[in-house]
Image: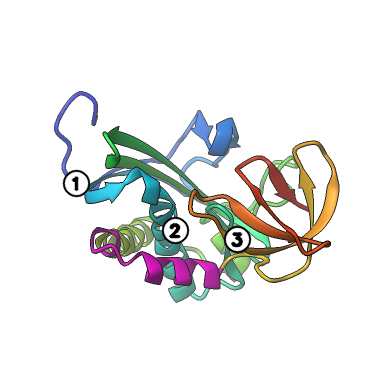
Amino acid sequence: MASNSVVENFTVVVTENQVKGRGQQGSVWESEVGKNLIFSVFVTFESLSVSDKKYLNYAVSLAVFEVLQQENIPGITIKWPNDILSAKKKIGGILIENSLKGAKISSSVIGIGLNVNQTSFSSSLENASSLTLSSNRTFDLEQLLIEIVTSLKSKISLLNTKAFESIETSYLNVLYKKNIPTMFKDSYDVLFMGIIRGVSKDGKLQVELEDETFKEFGIKEISFL
């Protein structure tokens, strides 16, 4: 739509049945028909630099996180870069695709998949959960969608006022496993212990190793065990 016509800011496209769901780096997102929230939001920006794109990721993650926190979903955290977890199980994923104009992000399509009322998952998705499984409640999908989009508008307004420090502080405060010794695996299948200390300017995960040195990892260069 955005490539073929003028699209209003915060236009939302929702589907009940997604047949080719995509995640980060070509991974797959699966969803049971009519049970979950699968939607994309078109957003334009006043003046967001490409070099500040990590704050967009923070803002979107926090928009979803805060709604679920208000809904009293237990054990909500954000797993770097933008997976939404409940009690260490994945309930949501985010994929942001940006359109650039010079050194600025002119617009983004923000794709969000949130497991809501689904109660069974493929055996290959042993780490998947849903809001219903986490809280023993059934949710109104439309109302939840409205809450998330409203939260997203609030967070995007913070981006437009360049409240980057506040956004980053909020994100790091709820980052999964931050400051906790954790076992990781790198892209060469090598296991190592480390402690997440933060996120670099270009959005890479900063991990303190056992020898007290620091190493930065991009998406798909590190996984949690």
Instruction: Work out whether mark 3 precedes mark 1 in sequence or the reverse, and give the earlier one.
Output: 1
Instruction: Work out whether mark 2 precedes mark 3 in sequence or the reverse, and give the earlier one.
Output: 2
Label 3: state its secondary structure: strand
The dot on residue 58 is: 2
Q: Residue 197: horizontal and vertical position, in percent? A: 64, 65
Quadrant of res 168: bottom left
Depth check: give the residue in front, 66 or 195: 195
Q: Start and end of the magenta stretch? A: 158-174
Instruction: Name the kind of residue labelled 2 in the image.
Output: Tyr
Q: Residue 172: horizontal and vertical position, in percent? A: 53, 68
Q: Mark 3 points at which residue?
A: 85
Q: Name the residue under label 1.
A: 9
Residue at 32% over, 64% down: 151
Q: Residues within 10 Å of mark 1 (few under 14, many from 20)?
A: some
Residue at 24% over, 62% down: 157
In this rendering, position of residue 222 left or right of residue 23:
right
Q: Is residue 2 above or below residue 63?
A: above
